[in-house]
Amino acid sequence: MGCLICERIQMIKEGINPYFVIELETGYVVMGDHQHFKGYSLFLCKQHVTELHYLSKDFKMKYLEEMSIVAEAIFNVFKPEKINYELLGNGDTHAHWHLFPRITCDTPQKGPVWWLPREEMWDDSKRPDDNELKIMVDDLKKEINQLLIK
């Protein structure tokens, strides 16, 4: 079975991933397919590794720095109360960050996003339409570029 993250990266390289936001030095920023948490994004590592400690020190430090910039941009664009940062790898082992903007009462009880029933979080009604997705991608890309200039 292939790597889902590598497949998504290949779609970016082929210009057919509508969720693609921007390529950075160490990874690719994409909007999440489902937006129960408005602004949910992922930062896909360019290197196919399963653990951060497999990255060279310089690459790892740059990857972490860029992930932080992406999270700041998400915060600035989508105005959440908090960002949750998760690098799990239990399903897709290729290193990738989940960046979840959080607001009060976005889940029935306080806790991680994964406590939300899967059928609710991944319901197709949570997919942005083409126009909404374009706005989200454009706004996030613009903000990342602004932060990279600073």
Image (spheres, grey):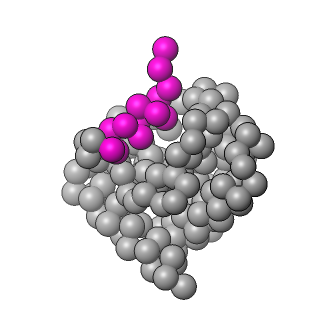
Residue 28 image position (x, y, % from top left): 47, 52
Residue 149 image position (x, y, % from top left): 49, 82
Write down the region rendered in magenta.
1-13
Residue 21 image position (x, y, % from top left): 38, 57
Q: Which residue is rendered at x = 58% and y = 68% of the image?
A: 69
134 left or right, relative to 10? left
The residue positioned farthest toward the left in the image shown:
131
Quarter assignment of residue 118:
top right
Establish if 59 lies above or below 121: below
Say if the magenta span includes residue 80.
no
Quarter assignment of residue 101:
bottom right
Q: Specify the principal SS of the magenta part.
A: helix
Q: Which residue is rendered at x = 42% and y = 51% of the image?
A: 31
Q: Which residue is rendered at x = 32% and y = 66% of the image?
A: 138
Establish if 146 lies above or below 51: below
Establish if 30 lies above or below 3: below
> In which quadrant of the rendered image does the C terminus lie?
bottom right
Residue 149 can be seen, yes or no? yes
